[in-house]
Amino acid sequence: MDLNGAAAIISGGASGLGEATARDLASHGATVVIADLNEERGKAIADELGGVFAKCDVSDEEQVQAAVDAAVATGKPLRVVVNSAGIGWASRTVGRDGKPHDLATYRKVIEVNLVGTFNLLRIGAAAIAKTEPIDGDGQRGVVINTASVAALEGQTGQIAYSASKGGIVGMTVPAARDLAAIGVRVNTICPGIIDTPIYGFSANADEFKAKLVAPVVFPKRMGQPSEFAHLVRSLIENDYMNAEVIRFDGGIRFQPK
Ligand SMILES: NC(=O)c1ccc[n+]([C@@H]2O[C@H](COP(=O)([O-])OP(=O)(O)OC[C@H]3O[C@@H](n4cnc5c(N)ncnc54)[C@H](O)[C@@H]3O)[C@@H](O)[C@H]2O)c1
């Protein structure tokens, strides 16, 4: 699918993987809509890319509907939805102090990462369905979700995060089947360790990142957000990629800790 002249909405587009994706898609002719909680950065990036910023919490129905409406209002047909908003959390099922995992935090991680992804997927796809097909296959658009290798081999303390990302992996095939009728493909990327602000910027963060990189097979480094964005674009541009869950991780296989 050609990005030129299309609108693309990117949740989490104000930072990290979403920001890199917004930059890449804009440089290939898309009008980008950055849907994020972070107004200051989101607006600055949207202005720089000639796109639109829509402040939204992905788990909120009305705010996501407004963000998708903003994409439709660009006047370019909405063809791409990229789900990249997400939050991390670390807590054991039963802590060292004997206390069970806090339920409110578990719910929050599921709400943002899993419900938020489904929320933009469903509202975005409904808007894509109103556009004209663009080829002989009847294609209208593409949805790319961001899960994590933690969906497949979550480490100690990743119970909430892994459950949320596992849900995204699980929805990939049924979403692709549901949306086939309207000519929309759905793919999910499972990143490994990619160098973004999600790990923070302190001296501790550098130490933590060095530890995370140890099990990477090759190349022996963190992934770059621009490499993730390249994969997103490849999945959009290659019309035969559908209902697929793809590891993007330099061969890493996480150990329990
Ligand atoms: N960086 C990695 O190594 C890595 C690995 C695996 C998966 N991921 C996933 O990739 C996605 C992007 O991560 P990143 O590293 O770019 O993180 P990041 O923290 O740099 O960016 C996340 C963005 O999401 C936004 N956001 C958070 N909650 C939101 C909400 N409720 N509504 C709207 N926007 C919200 C934040 O404001 C931020 O701009 C996340 O889903 C994350 O779980 C990242």
Image (cartoon, helix red, strand yellow):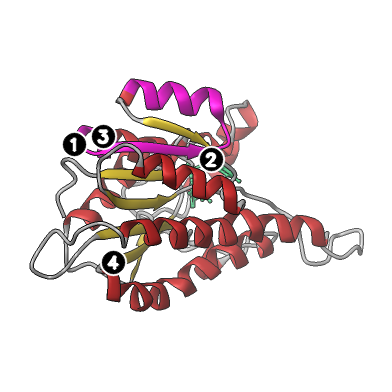
Residue 57 lies left or right of residue 149; in this view the side is right
Q: Which residue is mark 4?
A: 185
Q: Position of residue 138 (x, y in %)?
A: 16, 68
Q: Are marks 3 and 4 in contact (CB under 8 Å)?
A: no
**Residue 32 on the magenta span:** yes
Which comes before the other along the chain, label 4 or label 2? 4
Q: Which residue is mark 3?
A: 26
Amino acid type at mark 3: Ala
Q: Which residue is mark 1?
A: 29
Q: CA distance from mark 1 to mark 2?
A: 34 Å
Q: CA distance from mark 3 to mark 2?
A: 29 Å
**Residue 165 image-quadrant placement:** bottom right
Residue 104 showing in the rendered view: yes
Which comes before the other along the chain, label 1 or label 4? 1
Amino acid type at mark 1: Gly
Amino acid type at mark 2: Lys
Q: Which residue is mark 2?
A: 209
Q: Are marks 1 and 3 in contact (CB under 8 Å)?
A: yes
Q: CA distance from mark 1 to mark 3?
A: 5 Å
Q: CA distance from mark 1 to mark 4?
A: 20 Å
Q: Identify whether 136 is placed above or below 233.
A: below
At horizontal 31% and vertical 47% (from top left) the residue drawn is 219
Instruction: Please report the bounds of the magenta region as a residue range.
Output: 24-48
- Mark sitting on residue 180: none
Q: Are marks 1 and 4 in contact (CB under 8 Å)?
A: no
At horizontal 62% and vertical 49% (from top left) the residue drawn is 88
Q: Position of residue 40 (x, y in %)?
A: 54, 22
Residue 106 lies left or right of residue 166; in this view the side is right
